[in-house]
Amino acid sequence: MFKRRPTYVMEIDAQIRFRTEAVASHSPEFAALPEDDQKALMTDSVSRQAHQFAANELSSHGLKLKRSIAHKGHRWETGSDVQVNQLGEHHITLTVVCEGDRDNVLAVFERWLAEVSSFKGISEMGRTSIRGTDGTNLVQYSDEAIEAAQNLDPETAAMIDQLMDPDR
């Protein structure tokens, strides 16, 4: 009987650092674009380079890049999502879905994190995770997020607990 290899979802949530002035100073064509178009091009560049690096690493480790998976009522797709918060900060979620053995996936994940964190267009990686159909569930938050959670006043922490678990 054929045994299916486990599938994994690798994710990086990061804040984008736009270096529009640096590019505009070298490209009159880029400088002439509206700011939103400049940011869209730079966001696309981060996404494209991150996904290409992941695809190359997966291939070199004998792993299979997948477009999407559905598992236990959830669906994940390889791609990216950009959100802008109330402060105007742009955050990107990079998602890669793959199939293969756990050790090689973890090796690729570590290399992917190192590569993406070296991008000049990334100012902070707020959360990274890898989850698998084999039960793998590794999540890491930035030092800033951990410190903020640890420094919450007791009333706010209790309110969050209540909202997140009304049976408490």
Image (cartoon, rainbow, N blue to C red):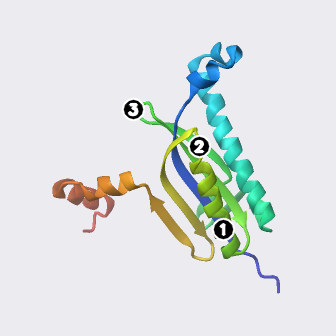
User: How many numbered dots are placed on residues in this image?
Assistant: 3
Residue 86 position in % (x across, y down): 39, 33
Image position of 68 with respect to 121: above or below: below
User: Which is more foreground, mark 3 or mark 2?
Assistant: 3
Mark carried by residue 147: none
Does the image show residue 67?
no
Name the residue at 74% across, 49% down: 52
Image position of 127 with respect to 98: above or below: above
Q: CA distance from mark 2 to mark 1?
A: 24 Å
Disc 1 target residue: 107
Name the residue at 70% across, 42% down: 48
Disc 2 target residue: 81
- As helix, strand or loop, the secondary structure at mark 1 comes to helix
Mark 2 near mark 1, Cβ–Cβ under 8 Å?
A: no
Who is closer to the viewer here, 39 or 68? 39
User: Which is more foreground, mark 3 or mark 1?
Assistant: 1
Disc 3 target residue: 87
Image position of 125 with respect to 87: above or below: below
Tell me the amino acid under the disc marked 1: Ala
Upstream in the sequence, badge 3 or badge 2?
A: 2
